[in-house]
Amino acid sequence: MRAAVLHEFGREKLDTLVNNAGILRDRMVFMVFSMSEEEWDAVIRVHLKGHFNTTRFAAAHGRQRSKAAGKPVYGRIVNTSSEAFLTGSAGQRGLDPLAPEHVAPLVGYLASPAAAGVNDRLFVVHGGMVTALDRPRVQAKYDSERETFTYDELDALLTPHSDGRPAGETFAATEVLALERG
């Protein structure tokens, strides 16, 4: 792949890499209980290894360009994903709000010079709406009284912390898909 990219677009320039690979079945594949080991391996191969391979190549190529130029030469890496990591996946939802034609303009913008200052951000596209999300934040911090925690110490700290959370609240940001345009 590396040779084909450099041959097609030139050795000196690789401005933008868009990692857009992903797989999903028309059922609850991200629910581990319904996945076979082969399906799990396929998800890891496509989602993680596929992104790693292309990102590694683009980063190494950018480093070589920077060394040759004697100064930083920046490109862009845009990684896309479904919203399943935020909300879970109850199977395919259909093409309406998640169709490529909704995501493509954002990817084009992120690859453009206008987005030079837009780095390390998370956006969710849903229909004709783009949502910018904050980074995860530390909710609480606990220090062990010794070098490592004991079971009883963790129980005394984490059980009350978890009991104080609203019922049904998880890391999933399901409210994102409840947002509406306007």
Image (cartoon, helix red, strand yellow):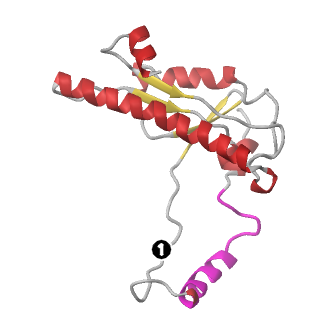
Question: Where 162 falls versus 117 (above or below)?
Answer: below
Left/right placement of residue 140 relative to residue 88 reads left
Q: Which residues are magenta?
A: 152-171
Q: Nearer the viewer, residue 113 or 40?
A: 40
Height in image: 8 above or below 124? Answer: above
Could you tell me the amino acid type at mark 1? Answer: Lys
User: In the image as oriented, which residue stretches furthest toward the left?
Assistant: 70
Disc 1 is placed on an element classified as: loop
Residue 176, position as x, y percentages in the image:
69, 45
Q: Is residue 170 visible?
A: yes
Q: Is residue 5 left or right of residue 39?
A: left
| Residue position marked by numbered label 1 in the rendering | 141
Identified at 33% across, 31% down, the residue is: 60
In the rendering, at what x and y percent does residue 109 appear?
Answer: 50, 22
Main SS of residues in magenta: helix
Q: Position of residue 149 (x, y in %)?
A: 48, 84
